[in-house]
Amino acid sequence: MSERSIMRLSSVQIAELARRTTTAVLPLGSVEQHGPHLPCGTDTFAADLVAAALAERLDALLVPVGPYGVTPIHAGHPGTVSLRRTTLEALLHDVAEALVADSAMDRLVLCNWHEGNNASIDAVATELQDHHPGVVVVTAHACYTAQRIYAAEGGELTHGGGIETMAVLAHDPALVRRDLAGTPSRTDHAEAMDAMRRDREVHGYVTDVSEIDRDGWYGRPGWATDERAATFADRVGAEIAAQVTRIFALREATS
Ligand SMILES: [Zn+2]
């Protein structure tokens, strides 16, 4: 666990830290089936790794929100645990409110690795900023940053594919069972469905993962290597840190 985690620090240490920095990083993931080759904690492991690297670069307090996210898309598969949107929003809201009220944090960075959380994150972030003049919230969808960074090297953000396998390798190689992945693929249909749901202009919705792929996962786990895993968290964390720093500077200039 990161030295910067609120779980490891005493109240006195957090008060000291708050005199130096008022930024907190909150990882958000999901617990859901990821095929036979990856653990159900994949998204949360990925979010935690990137958030820890990001907190290091931002000199921030790292604050876990909890492992679960909103993931009805994987309902019916053993190992999937989905929160209702209202539950995640209440949880995130209460954690953030406490950080502002009790720990003097006023720069909150939500580091997300699960697309099903997006709507809840946006709702809570805008509400927080609206209720607390002086508080700035920034959301980083680390999964999309990884998708962009690794695209040039053939990395793909698919459910249980290369990028997610790399993230689990980075967390704990013993949890990756590539021998159980069968014949990995990303069909043209899956690619078209991903493009459809991720388009920022006009997009449709996938409400069951089997609409993308019958097996519930797709992609190329073999793309992930130990070399890529070794630098994953720091590479994605550094990229996000630069963007977050720019946004904070912009908000300082306009406040
Ligand atoms: Zn995932």
Image (cartoon, rainbow, N blue to C red):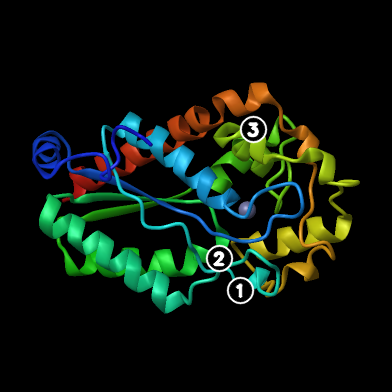
Residue contact between numbered discs 2 and 1, judged by CB atoms under 8 Å: yes
Residue picked out by circle 1: 72
Determine which of the numbered discs, if any, sits on residue 199 in the image. Answer: none
Label 2: how many Cα within 10 Å (few below 14, some 14–19, many 20+): some
In the rendered view, would you say 38 is above or below 49? below
At horizontal 14% and vertical 36% (from top left) the residue drawn is 17
Q: Of the residues shown, which amino acid type is indicated by label 2?
A: Gly
Find residue 212 and report its horizontal and vertical position in percent: 79, 65
Residue picked out by circle 3: 173
At horizontal 55% and vertical 57% (from top left) the residue drawn is 114
The residue carrying mark 3 has its beta carbon less than 8 Å from ligand 1: no
Residue picked out by circle 2: 116
* Residue 34 visible within the image: yes
Q: CA distance from mark 2 to mark 1?
A: 8 Å
Q: Of the residues shown, which amino acid type is indicated by label 3?
A: Pro
Helix, strand or loop at disc 1?
helix
Tell me the quarter of the picture where residue 146 sits.
top right
Find residue 183 and report its horizontal and vertical position in percent: 91, 46
Helix, strand or loop at disc 3?
helix
Helix, strand or loop at disc 2?
helix
In the rendered view, would you say 207 is above or below 12? below
In the rendered view, would you say 209 is above or below 20? below
Find residue 223 and report its horizontal and vertical position in percent: 77, 33
